[in-house]
Image (cartoon, rainbow, N blue to C red):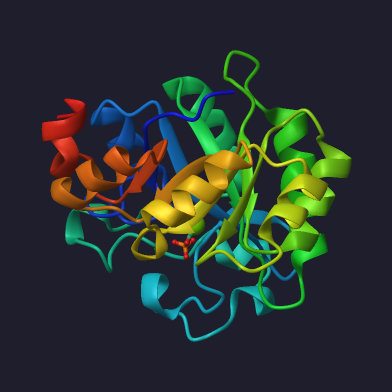
Amino acid sequence: MKLPELMGHRGAAAHAPENTLASLRKAKGFGLGWVEFDVQLSADDVPVLMHDDRLHRTTGDRRKIAEVPAEELLALDAGAWFGPEFAGETVPHFSSVLALLGALDLAANIEIKPSPGLARETAEAGLTLAKAEWPAALPLPLISSFEIEALEVAQALWHEAPRAYLMKQLPAEWQETADRLGCLSLHLWHPAITAKTVAAIKKADYQIAAYTVNGAERARALLDLGVDCLITDDPPALAPLFGVS
Ligand code: G3P
Ligand code: MG
């Protein structure tokens, strides 16, 4: 599979509250074909979209996500912090996200983003659900994680879905790990990407995605270096390159 050139980050996080259904709709509205988002577990092992392991930044709740049962979590307002027009936008159940992806014809990079110590559980619950409910008309999702254990679960549980090894910068043993996990791509923090990094990754025959790229100048430089995919909060900021609106 060839990576898309552009993916929305947490939906379109500069324009709508991250990891909500509104953010996915916003990304589609900008003309994107792919989005990235973060999957975590409630206290009772229900997969939802959330980035932080603490709920405060996006919901105002003082607890950790791993302490809150789904019934309460799914009722939390995850939109009002971003703007009054998004008040009432709740933490989405992963199942609602999968249904919306199908309805919007929007492909996805599922990032498994476990609370500390929950890599296996998060990957198992998230990917079991995704595999059962994945919209048949969409390409299989790209499954990424910073957690090697989560990628091992993905490899065993849903082998056909491509995997991406997510990292801030390249660790010494990156190629051995990516080979063992059968990855399609490596996803790196964009400031860590240099011509040397790109050359090493390309030599090993992996594709490269860069996160989170929100300026057209840097986007152009990364594409010129040979980066295959840019993950952005702000699709319109990259409009000069991609013609998104
Ligand atoms: O998947 C790319 C990017 O989302 C990884 O970092 O912290 O934004 O999930 P983070
Ligand atoms: Mg992410």
Asked if one can make out residue 10 in the rendered structure from this viewpoint, the answer is no
Asked if one can make out residue 119 in the rendered structure from this viewpoint, the answer is yes
Q: Position of residue 134 (x, y in %)?
A: 67, 27
Q: Position of residue 183 (x, y in %)?
A: 69, 42
Q: Residue furthest top?
A: 137
Q: Is residue 166 left or right of residue 100?
A: right
Between 47 and 119, the one lying in front of the other is 119
Q: Residue furthest bottom?
A: 62
- Number of residue marks: 0
Location of residue 166 (image quadrant): bottom right
Q: From the viewer's perspective, is residue 216 above or below residue 106?
A: below
Q: Position of residue 159 (x, y in %)?
A: 82, 34
Between 73 and 125, the one lying in front of the other is 125
Q: Residue at x 55, y 58 (%)?
A: 74
Q: Residue at x 39, y 41 (%)?
A: 227
Q: Residue at x 21, y 28 (%)?
A: 242
Q: Position of residue 121 (x, y in %)?
A: 81, 62
Q: Is residue 187 left or right of residue 114?
A: left
Q: Residue at x 47, y 55 (%)?
A: 197
Quarter of the picture containing the C terminus is top left
Q: Residue furthest right?
A: 156
Q: From the viewer's perspective, is residue 196 above or below residue 119?
A: above
Q: From the viewer's perspective, is residue 13 above or below residue 146?
A: above
Location of residue 138 (image quadrant): top right
Between 180 and 55, the one lying in front of the other is 180
